[in-house]
Image (spheres, coloured by chain):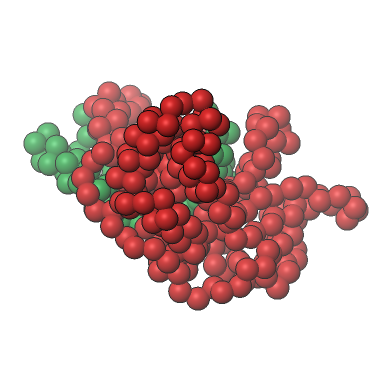
Amino acid sequence: MAPLGLGDELRAAFRSGGECWGFLCLHREDAPLGFTEADARLVARLSSHVGAGLRRAMLVGAAGAGAEFDAPGVLVLGEDRSLVATTAAGDRWLWELPSPEQLGSLPLAVEAVLAGLEAIRAGRDDVVPRVRVRTRSGRWAVLHASDMAGLGEARHVAIVVEPAKPSELAPLILLAYGLTQREAEVAQSALQGRPNKAVAGALRISENTVEDHLKSVFAKVGVGSRGELTARIFSEQSGHRPNQLCSGPS
Amino acid sequence: MAVVGRPAARGEAVQALAARCYAGLDSMSLQRELVDFLGRNLAVDAVFCASVDPATLLFTGAAGSGHRNETGGQRAVPRDHGSARTRR
């Protein structure tokens, strides 16, 4: 980091429920001794709480006002990350995506999928650069980036922005409610309308275990039935949902 | 010692921020409070905090402070760290 004028560095991942929900990077310009163990302990003390907070924050957003369009949008960026072209829907999505206050002109989600694409090009990663993000109006969008071909020498990138499909969003929402992986699997099967017997068969567990998992799912999500669970999870997609997450650590 | 403030006061500040993590804040508000806390309680020159999509570890939102966010080098941090995955 020295070329950027940044000295010693301290990083942390914010985890909760076995997943990573955030990331922290601290820098000191001129620190001969670097970050101390006390510094690291302080960040470590906070990290699980911040992880839980960021996880729960996935369920907090604006109340789904406006933004009634559903068309996928396309953004075309040049090699220098300048915006070369957009579709009409792409232009609307640009306004919908949250932008960093001081960190640059492109929405951070756009920067993120570009970084993911660069990581694939460099062979550092093989995960498709996709990101699910809550928009300014509270609904969820998915972005994915890919290289374009056939436009001459210059390298262009196409970024598609579209409303998140329930099947893409449900796993994220279920994890945000603090469900375990197994509970999330049971819940997703239930959301697909499968009866308990079918869920048990698919997951190779007993029906009683399915019922126990569903009880835990209902308690964590704050609902009392499969119907309410379905309504709650799918209402998250549009941002039209109650906000009741103000309880203590879990 | 790089940690700023008396230990007792610092411990209270940590507890207060931890409580805020369960107060139903939206992601940006929580990140701003974290950045502000770190600026007041650790002697740091730059802070970058991001929320990520847990499936891909790509950033979904970010907050930061420090001179690098106010100069020509401001885009270096998110561009360099566009994903937590790339540096893990």
Q: Is residue A199 above or below residue A234?
A: above
Q: Position of residue A49 (x, y in %)?
A: 28, 39
Name the residue at 45% across, 54% down. A230
Relative placement, left or right, of A41 versus A209 is left
Residue at the image point whose x is 62% and y is 46% from the top:
A130
Residue A200 percent location from the top left of the image: 49, 31
The residue lying toward the viewer, choosing from B9 and A68, is: A68
Residue A21 showing in the rendered view: no
Q: In this orientation, which residue lies closer to the viewer: B79 or A135?
A: A135
- Residue A238 shown left or right of residue B29 in the figure: right
Report the residue at 69% width, 55% height from top: A159
Tell me which chain appears green. B
Residue pictured at 70% horizontal, 35% vertical: A120
Q: Is residue A235 left or right of residue A217?
A: right
**Image check: A66 left or right of B24?**
right
A67 over A59 or under it: above or below: below
In percent of width and height, residue A170 lies at 50, 49
Examine the rendered structure and indicate whether residue A53 appears above or below residue A98. above
Which quadrant of the rendered structure holds the C terminus of chain A? Answer: top left
Q: Colour of chain A?
A: red
How many numbered markers are drawn?
A: 0
